[in-house]
Image (cartoon, grey):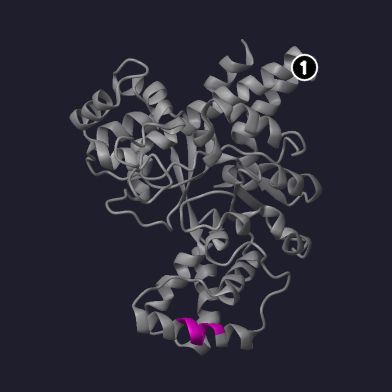
């Protein structure tokens, strides 16, 4: 059995994804959700005119009963005939995942629940708690500025009893130059006073106070769960250079010895920066998730560039599928293909043995995530 055949049979652990939306979408809505953009593509073009769109036609169409490279109009029609729920079920089950680690902090209309996600995928589903969402939910209550810091820490401790990890989108809100020490209580109180007053005045609960984001991050570290950190590209809310993972270096140096792993998500185009951090700080692990779908036939190059310096025990699979089950399926299908191409090239150049290739494939596809999140003990 070749390494590509072996990869096709390994049950994946998708260590970072989101719920799917169970609305029946028209062609325009579906095409828009293939992109990270908020707005539709320019007139005369479509979200299908991208590597993601090409990949949907190549890899998802056969799962829904169409020929590979089906026309976008035929694809949308077939998805409509099957319905969003049945289409999502077929696509999620075709991923071949044993476990999904789901970030529940991105509310999309008609997103499925964790229980529905488990039923659709026939996989074990675990929750990853988004720090900023917890803080924003608390801000909508009667909590005072003086109590906010302590109440947030208590709520995170409560969530840690059922979750497998935390996640921060500091890259979007304040940038990744997180402070190497916890902010003092007085600064937390002052920041909470400013932010809560602004929330009350505007009716908009969006955590963009640097001190409060830092407080949330430092409050979750003693709880023993891995912390996922968005790095690299994303949607238009993000200013890219502030999402460079190398900005985290002082923070990483200051992590307590007993801290759980720090998980760098996405990375691209800074995936080599993330790989460097993983190579010199054993607590740092990473994925390239979002980049797999968006780079299409170049996904193998992105994986190879990441593995230039990242230890093989630090890289994990993730789809970052969000909203559309197509994105979960593409992540799985193209990851298997890309990693297979990388390992086959190494075998051809006598870099490693077939036994090594098999072990590294299983590590990256599933075993590293099982170890990092202690999934086998759950």
Residue visible at 50% across and 36% down in the picture? 294
Residue neighbourhood size for the residue with mark 1, other residues' Cα within 10 Å, grouped as few (<14), some (14–19), many (≥20): few
Up/down of 173 relative to 75, above or below: below
Residue range in magenta is 191-195
> Considering depth in this image, is 260 or 293 the residue closer to the camera?
293
**Image position, residue 247 (x, y; %):** 70, 59
Residue 193 painted magenta: yes
Disc 1 designates what residue? Answer: 353
Up/down of 333 relative to 203, above or below: above
Up/down of 8 relative to 235, above or below: above
Q: Is residue 131 left or right of residue 42?
A: right
* Disc 1, SS: loop
Residue 14 painted magenta: no
Please indicate, yes or no, whether residue 212 appears anywhere in the rendered image. Answer: yes
> Considering depth in this image, is 70 or 283 the residue closer to the camera?
70
Up/down of 255 relative to 342, above or below: below
Q: Residue 337 appears in which quarter of the rendering?
A: top right
């Amino acid at each position: 059995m070749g390494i590509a055949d072996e990869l096709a049979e390994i049950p994946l652990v998708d260590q970072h994804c989101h719920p799917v939306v169970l609305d029946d979408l028209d062609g325009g809505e579906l095409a828009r959700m293939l992109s990270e953009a908020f707005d539709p593509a320019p007139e005369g073009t479509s979200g299908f005119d991208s590597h993601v769109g090409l990949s949907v036609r190549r890899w998802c169409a056969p799962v829904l009963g169409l020929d590979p490279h089906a026309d976008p109009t035929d694809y949308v029609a077939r998805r409509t005939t099957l319905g969003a729920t049945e289409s999502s079920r077929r696509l999620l089950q075709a991923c071949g995942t044993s476990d999904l680690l789901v970030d529940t902090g991105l509310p999309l209309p008609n997103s499925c629940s964790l229980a529905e996600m488990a039923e659709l995928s026939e996989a074990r589903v675990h929750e990853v708690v988004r720090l900023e969402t917890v803080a924003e939910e608390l801000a909508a209550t009667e909590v005072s500025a003086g109590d906010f810091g302590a109440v947030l820490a208590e709520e995170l401790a409560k969530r840690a009893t059922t979750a497998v990890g935390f996640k921060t989108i500091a890259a979007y809100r304040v940038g990744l130059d997180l402070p190497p020490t916890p902010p003092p209580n007085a600064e937390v109180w002052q920041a909470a006073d400013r932010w809560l007053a602004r929330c009350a005045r505007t009716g908009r609960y969006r955590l963009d106070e640097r001190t409060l984001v830092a407080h949330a991050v430092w409050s979750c570290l003693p709880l023993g769960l891995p912390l996922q950190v968005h790095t690299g590209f994303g949607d238009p809310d993000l200013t890219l250079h502030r999402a460079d993972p190398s900005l985290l270096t002082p923070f990483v140096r200051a992590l307590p010895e007993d801290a759980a792993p720090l998980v760098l998500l996405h990375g691209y185009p800074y995936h080599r920066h993330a790989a460097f951090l993983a190579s010199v700080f054993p607590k740092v692990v990473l994925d390239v998730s979002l980049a797999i779908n968006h780079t299409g036939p170049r996904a193998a190059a992105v994986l190879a560039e990441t593995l230039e310096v990242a230890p093989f025990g630090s890289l994990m699979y993730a789809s970052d599928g969000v909203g559309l089950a197509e994105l979960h399926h593409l992540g799985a299908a193209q990851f298997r293909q890309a990693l297979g191409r990388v390992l086959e090239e190494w075998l051809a150049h006598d870099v490693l043995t077939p036994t090594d290739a098999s072990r590294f494939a299983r590590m990256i596809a599933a075993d590293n995530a099982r170890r990092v999140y202690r999934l086998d003990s759950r």
